[in-house]
Image (spheres, rainbow, N blue to C red):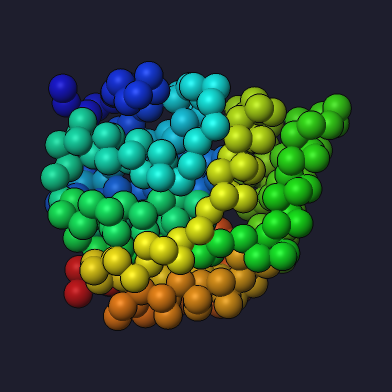
Amino acid sequence: MSAMGGMVRVEVRNLIPSYEVIGKGPELVLIPGTFADRRTWSRVVGRLSARFRCLLFDPRGTNETPDPGTPFTADDLADDVAAAMNAAKFDRAHLVGHSLGAAVAVILAARRPETVRRLVACSPAAAPDAYLSAVLDLWAGLSESALPDHVVHLGIVVNSFGRGAFENGTVRAIVDEMDRHPLARATIRRYVECNRALDLNPVMRDVDASTLVIVGSQDALTGVEGARTVSASISGARLEVIEGAGHGPHLEAPMAFARIVTSFLTS
């Protein structure tokens, strides 16, 4: 089954994720973060697909992929990515993951090394610290509230971006997109629990792929120190800080992000 020219659905443990393939060149898988889907890469996919054959997909419970209605872990999400890669005939690919997607990419690189060429982990955390745990508690409370979706969505993103992203309209555009495609409150809660259970410490030492860790200098959610911890825990990994960006460098500084990723993957 070809993935070119449109969305493709693949049966994965009773889950049907949607994906698409764009571009030509070495294979590159783009893994979204918490609550995000393939549209999160819209500001960088044009540049990346000029050099790579990009696999974009909707994680469970987002956009065109249904939520199976059961709890899941980052390991389950890694299995979903592997299944989408198999369906798209991506035998061995570069991985670029953001936030929770970065953790998923690390797990995939550690447990299925034969499928991974190089790894880019953007805005990662090895495990929730006290600050991120408090944010997750806030998200859980928002998901259980009677507040309008717009307020819930604003509460989810307000800690995630640098000040410039508020001033230039990036955050408003993201919230507007979330308002148009709201996640089910139960899906939000399941992603919160997935993040609460995350612990990369047992697997980071098993990553053999050449690794780049990217973080925004104004990332308040997982922070520069969180990225530094991940970088120090993966053999040979290097850290790149994008000045002025918050938790979403691919959205806040897309040109710099695409340039850094392309340079790393082609060097």
Q: Quadrant of the N terminus?
A: top left
Describe residue 173's horizontal placement relative to residue 54 as left or right.
right
Q: Is residue 175 visible?
A: yes
Question: Residue at left 34%, top 71%?
Answer: 205
Describe residue 28's horizontal placement relative to residue 176 as left or right.
left
Vertical relation: 158 (above or below) 192: below
106 or 18, which is in the foreground? 106
Q: How many marks?
A: 0
Describe residue 22's horizontal placement relative to residue 46 as left or right.
left
Question: Residue at left 24%, top 67%?
Answer: 209
Residue 26 in picture, x, y percent from top left: 16, 54
Residue 74 in picture, x, y percent from top left: 46, 46
Question: Residue at left 29%, top 66%?
Answer: 207
Question: Residue at left 50%, top 36%?
Answer: 72
Residue 123 in picture, x, y percent from top left: 51, 64
Vertical relation: 126 (above or below) 32: below
Q: Is residue 162 visible?
A: no
Describe residue 254's horizontal placement relative to residue 113 as left or right.
right
Q: Quadrant of the C terminus?
A: bottom left
Determine the image quadrant of residue 133: bottom right
243 or 93, which is in the foreground? 93
Determine the image quadrant of residue 214: bottom left
246 or 210, which is in the foreground? 210
209 or 177, which is in the foreground? 209
Residue 242 in picture, x, y percent from top left: 51, 74
| Residue ranking furthest to the front | 202
Vertical relation: 70 (above or below) 154: above
